[in-house]
Image (tube, rainbow, N blue to C red):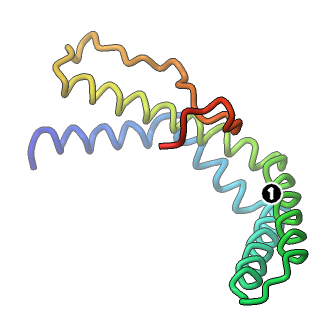
Amino acid sequence: MTEVERLARELGKAVQADERYIAYLNCKKANDEDKELQNLIGRLNLIQMNYQQEAAKADSDENKLKLYNEDFENVYGEIMTNQSMKKFEEAKQDVDDMMNYVVKLLSMVTNGADPEIAQPDMTPETGCTGDCGSCGGCG
């Protein structure tokens, strides 16, 4: 095992011991145990399956597809306002932010930055706003 691999494994252990990761795991477990949330997810999957079956038909019913889409959006909205899901999303974002920092730091270092003082710019990037009129294109 190389020194880099050994240190990567140590970093993995540190990530798993980090309070943000532990909070994420706890929130994931709470989601799994939240019966209301699991029922909503089951409904969402059923709606999606019905939509796909209808859309695959040669003579698919546009009204049915529209209703499935509306149902999907409604149930998805219920899922995303569920307290367990909200906490999970926040915890997941914290872990994502931590990992993005680590990746950016490693990228800086592999491009010659001093590992002792390198500071990744964690200013949120402007991403998709959902308003295609203000966009230069996806990609």
Q: Position of residue 1 (x, y in %)?
A: 10, 50
Left or right of 5? Residue 9 is right
Q: Position of residue 9 (x, y in %)?
A: 26, 45
Q: What amino acid is labelled 1 in the image?
A: Tyr
63 shown above or below 60 = above
**Disc 1 on helix, strand or loop?**
helix
Q: Which residue is mark 1?
A: 76
In the image, farthest residue toward the bottom: 58
Q: Position of residue 127 (x, y in %)?
A: 57, 32
Left or right of 126? Residue 49 is right
Q: Position of residue 25 (x, y in %)?
A: 58, 49
Left or right of 71? Residue 124 is left
In the image, farthest residue toward the left: 2
Please tell me which residue is depicted at 47% across the width and 43% down the height of the picture.
139
Q: Quadrant of residue 107?
A: top left
- How packed mark 1 is, by other alpha carbons closer than 10 Å (few <14, some 14-19, many 20 or more), is some
Please tell me which residue is depicted at 47% across the width and 20% down the height of the picture.
122
In the image, farthest residue toward the top: 117
38 shown above or below 2 = below
Please tell me which residue is depicted at 11% across the width and 39% down the height of the picture.
3
Query: How many numbered discs, if any?
Result: 1
Q: Which of these two is toward me, 58 or 86?
A: 58
